[in-house]
Image (cartoon, rainbow, N blue to C red):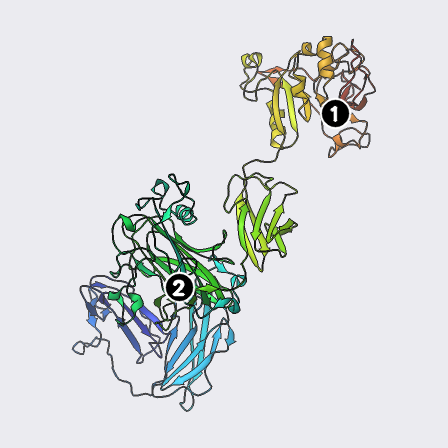
Amino acid sequence: MNSDDGFRVTAGRNPGAPAARELGVFSGGRGVADTLFYVNVAEDGIYPVRLIWYEGDGGAAVEFFSVDLTAEPPTKILVNDRANARSVKSYSLLRVPQTPTVSVSPLPGAANVWPGLAIQAQITDQDTAVAAGSVKLWVNGQEVAANVTKSGTVTTARYQPAGLLPSGQTLTVELQFADTASPANQASHTWQFSVRDYSGLPVLQGGYAIPASQINRNTSGFAVDVYQMVDGSGAVVPRPGNANTIAAAEAQLARANLDPATGQPYLNGAYTGTLPDGRHEVEVINWNQQAPAGAGAFTAANDPWSANLHFTDTEIPGIFPGDTAQQNWIVAEAVGYVELQPGIYRFGVNSDDGFKLTSGLNPKDLVATVLGQFDAGRGSTADLPQSACDFVVEQAGIYPLRLLWFEGEGGANCELHNLEMEGNASTLLNDRNRTLHLKVYREYTGPARPSIRSLTPGRGATAVARDATIEVIIENYTGDVTLALDGAPVTPEKSVAGSATTVRYVPTTRYPSDATVNVTLGYAGVTLPWSFTTINDPDVGAKIAWVSFHPGDNTPSTDAANAGFTAAPDAGYTQLLAANGYAVTRVLTSGTPDTALLNTFDLVIISRSVPSGDYQDPPETLAWNGLTAPTMIMGGYVLRNSRLGFTTGATIPDTAGTVSLKVNEPAHPIFQGVALGQDGVMVNPYANRVSFNGSLQRGISVNTDPVAGGGRVLATIATAGDPALNGMVIGEWDAGARLANGAADTLGAAAWCS
């Protein structure tokens, strides 16, 4: 094909049917250009072929040709060029009876199909007709109850599911029928299409619906509150900071901005409506500050019938028409009750400037479901829609609807409409002059509807404390409530004061750190989901003070740095503790320790990297032994009777090589997971000697004298021939133990030596 613009060539028993074989296609616009495609013909014959060609703007041309590949170079020959013997012949008429033709909806290969649409096939009689009672429709391999009707020569099989077509799925549809030929021809047409994924759309829960008995169905349209701030001279007052946002508009509507001259809310520049509460009665929302001039999509000039008064723009309720400063900084709230069937809907808002469209148990609810919004200033367009508001309705009913519209400076207009997908037609909401309108009622006559007064933490709140209390106050409701966190039910506290219910939940365990917490509140037949994000505050284990003469993991002492260390030699210990969730703080060793600070820790570890002289004189030993925080001492020199006094002597040989330990109390928790032989000796070595800068270093200094103060020796050196054989390596003392140093100190807390 050579074409300007696109084309499609198909072949088959019925080349126009959905199941016809596609031979070639170009989908789009272009200037004249070739598209070549190969066709493999299995056997000689005359085959039905269909060409569809289309053109948009500009040039228009089409050529249907074959390519003679035997010529050199290959030659194009127009199809049916009877002057060329090598042309492919084409015939325009058939002499055989033609069977019924089929057209389907949704189209084969269609994507993002509206889930409320019916599946439909139309079969048009040709030389033979559709045999009565032969039409069947299958969806994903299951026969469905299609409604089959016939009008003239057209048989229609229509299937309207009870609910919505499944979200995001590809459906395979098969149409089967027979014709009136003898013998009958059995026809089967199969096609596929994919449904729009609507799983993320807002949902109007069935519990939002209002009983029909509580709606005055003799009323029509919306009740509209319009507010324009003016000062005592009548001059229009902008919102604070000239803000043109939803939040600023809500504050204005709530009369939250006070006139500094009076201390009261600003006067309203909009005149009063006819309803008892001063609101305005409005049939449809098609407003323009320069009415009857048109703005947006619904204008008198766009009225296809030239007879629908609702296409003519009307003035903004309460605001005199014009385009001056007196038509600026307006906010309006329109509330109505719209009658809906189960399905998916697309409402649209064309506006200058922004808007927010919501529904819920109460149209003014703090947590009403947001159907759509535009949170800034803009000019309106004639697009249908300018802002789409797609949502799902679970069950038939009359639902509250609230439109917040706001305007800053310049143009001011607003339209609220819905798109009827089956007919692909947009209609102003409640335009009762149109067949496809949706009814909106203005007056609710029932009792006060439940409404969320406050919600803590708020929707989308961030940096929430991990132990934050969840609290919700529900007005006009005293019934049952449920609460779930991340899908797991919890039991909240419930208290009732008058007509309000407070739901309060204090977490028994902290929420995860830096995580989204999903909350679901059930009340009044609906569920309220919301979420918040916690602060980055990870759990940590016990607080440990690591006593050493190295100030930091990456800051060795001066002597260690001079010896070539770039990090503290004992950093492996502190890093291991931190990696296991402990909060480790380095504390510099001292003969005058800050005992008040040390006693705030869950554990004090006196490392091997300390000078024993800090633990020698009576004031020093009294301070260290008097700690009330449990203490672990890792170096043998500090344990001697000339220091802290955990042993009765000062004998302290070094181990000579690789050593193992003999465990005296295998059931002690400290040995959990340690492999022991039958003799209680560790299967794996405990320690060995290492080299630094090519020099073999000393072994472990081990106390071999008896322990003092009733200490329990948990493990000793077991390596035969080692100078430290039978010396204590791991011991345990209870608080109150009397030690063997010169001052005979009393131990202030449990201690372990290793």
Residue sticking out furthest to the right? 710
Is residue 679 something that shows in the picture? yes
Give the amino acid type for the residue marked by disc 1 in the picture: Ser
Q: Quadrant of residue 534?
A: top right
Is residue 654 something that shows in the picture? no
Image check: 1 left or right of 184?
left
Give above or below for 366 relative to 651.
below
Q: Secondary structure at mark 1?
A: loop
Q: Residue at x 31, y 50 (%)?
A: 378
Q: Earlier in the sequence, mark 1 or mark 2?
A: 2
Question: Around disc 1, counting alpha carbons within 10 Å, would you say few (fewer than 14), some (14 to 19), or many (20 or more)?
Answer: many
Tell me where residue 203 appears, x and y as whole percent. 49, 59
Image check: 713 left or right of 135?
right
Mark 1 and mark 2: span between their CA atoms? 73 Å
Query: Dot 2 corresponds to which residue?
Result: 111
Query: Dot 1 corresponds to which residue?
Result: 660
